[in-house]
Image (cartoon, helix red, strand yellow):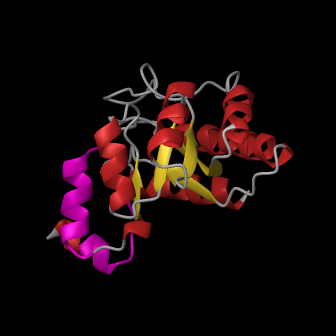
Amino acid sequence: MVLRLLKALGTGFDCASKAEIQQILEMGTEPSRIIYAQPCKTNSYVSYAAANGVKQMTFDNTDELYKIKKFFPDAELFIRIVTDDTSSLCRFSMKFGASLDSTKELLTVAKELGLNVVGVSFHVGSGAGDPLAFLKAVRDARTVMDQAESFGYKMHTVDVGGGFSSENFEAMAVVLSDALEQ
């Protein structure tokens, strides 16, 4: 019911597995509202996304870029960046995300491969406790978007993967909205 409500409200879906993508597609959701945000995608899942028109996907390393080039060269890519998730219950940046020191190299490889990078993705960790984590992440996303522009990319989206908690949802929403406006 929650997923159906979110679909009716027009939200997008950040999916991390084939099963999640299938579930959202089976509800009649347009593939353009799904981003395949698994950091370590299997070849078959990339092919599944391609076959079902789920063009948006994340990457944070060159191996993913080569895999996407081979199995879905028309994908619309989001470079996933590391965030400060120290106040989160479940920290993802310890395992996933490109550091700001590596984003230029990743953009260089993506350009050389002829891939289409359209946005930046981040996740401040599940159960984030500090609303200011969103402020820093959005500022870092802006830095990467500026870098991408120097490569000729026209980025248009920031994918906020999650991290909201019910205890401080409103405070987080205000910080995120203000950061995006800036």
Q: Compared to 137, does 40 lie above or below?
A: above
Magenta-drawn segment: 5-28
Number of marks in the rendered image: 0
Residue 148 at what x, y percent from top left? Answer: 76, 44
> Does 68 appear in magenta?
no
- Residue drawn 40% across and 44% down? 37
Q: Residue furthest bottom?
A: 8
Does residue 36 appear to the left or right of 78 in the view shown?
left
Does residue 131 appear anywhere in the picture?
no
Does residue 26 appear to the left or right of 101 in the view shown?
left
- Residue drawn 65% across and 57% down? 180
Q: Residue furthest front?
A: 70
Q: Residue furthest right?
A: 150
Position of the C terminus by quadrant? bottom right
Does residue 27 appear anywhere in the picture?
yes
> Toward the viewer: 115 or 130?
115
Q: Residue furthest left?
A: 1
Residue 81 at what x, y percent from top left? Answer: 57, 34
> Toward the viewer: 136 or 48?
48
Residue 13 at what x, y percent from top left? Answer: 36, 60
Residue 177 at what x, y percent from top left? Answer: 58, 60
> Does 22 appear in magenta?
yes
Does residue 31 appear to the left or right of 145 in the view shown?
left
Position of the N terminus by quadrant? bottom left
> Toward the viewer: 90 or 87?
90
